[in-house]
Amino acid sequence: MTKYNFRTIKQEIDQNIWHNGYLIYGEEYYLIKQIIALICNRFVEPQMQDIDLVKINAGLKLSAEDIERVKQELQTPPFMSERKVILLEKTGYFSRAEQGKVEERKKKQEELSQIFSLLNSGSCLILYEENVDGRLKKKLKSWLESGGVQVEIGREEISVLRHWLQVKAQQKRIGLTYEAADNLIDRCESDMTQLEQEFSKVLLYAEYAGLAGIDLATIDLVCKSDLRGTVFDLTDAVSAGQTDKALNLLDTLLILKEPLPLIRFMFARHIKQLICAKELGNEQLLIKKIGVYPFVARRLIKQARNMSIEKLEHFYRLAFESDWKVKRGHMTDRLSFETLLIEASLTFAGKVR
């Protein structure tokens, strides 16, 4: 089964190659929106979009009325456009049903599958899904055999995102260091929507302040907090037995309105990554194993050198127990996390075995 990505489907669009149906999904919603807009604008002029562009957001609760409407729209020719475009969002058809809702989902999926046979050259059906379970091969095969295509749009590589930011900076005749670009990409978890929002603020500030270039100090001043960087600092403080510093860093994150569940998740993930770094001991292997950026891998390898695998594993067990206490209602989220930092600091300081 042929699966398209952003570049291959964009290449076909540029070459004026079109399909009767598009199943579009993936992590990078910024690029997904671009592809959907290109398809809609190609077939339906802006002044005709109220008539020949049909949008239905099912919100994972696709009704029988929605399905019937899609059937009718597919069988009705466009009014004054080359094709009628139907955008059907979040049907959940290509994902597994929640426990207890299998029969209900199965019935809806059977009804929706009847739509596929109605795909035709006078219309274009776009299915936008948040998730597609690749194990549901029968459903995917049914879609492809009906004339639809499968398009997965994931996160871009750091080199692509860095170039994207540099082009934006060059358009304003402002420089941008690699360090600043990579740090901002990491802060935004490679999410292009967040990146565009944050970098727009940086460019506005740079223009207002008359800066010739943007460096890491500018990013620190203008952008959202560097949560991953602070997690590194938290871990450094804990491993050095500096309890006060660790608690102060946590306070700073909370003052900046970072959600504690996210801090906890990032912290636990960081410990797991440190264990991997300790076991692998090689930057390239670490990048391949856990999918982090090179500069993050370098920092993980360096930080892991100062810790034994035994203490890292104990650290991870403490994090697991801390999370368990919150979920069981034995402790509040903040008290539990502060206790984790204190216990871990004492362990690394050698005051607790």
Image: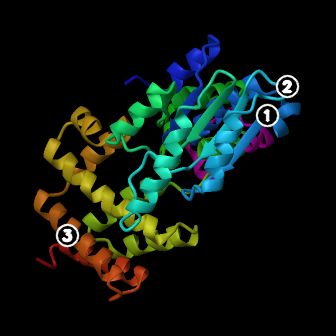
- Which numbered disc flags the more N-terminal residue, 2 or 3? 2
Instruction: Tell me the quadrant of the picture where the N terminus can be found.
Output: top left
Report whether 226 appears left or right of 353: right
Q: CA distance from mark 2 to mark 3?
A: 64 Å
Q: CA distance from mark 1 to mark 3?
A: 57 Å
Residue range (magenta)? 204-222
Which of the 4 image quadrants contains residue 10? Answer: top right
Q: Does the segment drawn in magenta span residue 139?
A: no
**Secondary structure mostly seen in the magenta stretch:** helix
User: Circle 1 is placed at which residue position?
Assistant: 52
Residue 129 in sight from this viewpoint = no
Under mark 1, the amino acid is Asp
User: Circle 3 is placed at which residue position?
Assistant: 317
Q: In x, y percent, where is residue 190? A: 50, 41
Circle 2/circle 3 CB separation < 8 Å: no
Instruction: Tell me the quadrant of the picture where the C terminus can be found.
Output: bottom left
- Which numbered disc flags the more N-terminal residue, 1 or 3? 1
Which of the 4 image quadrants contains residue 301? Answer: top left
Report whether 25 appears left or right of 133: right
Taking the spot 51% from the left edge, 69% from the top edge, the residue there is: 259
Circle 1/circle 2 CB separation < 8 Å: yes
Under mark 3, the amino acid is Arg
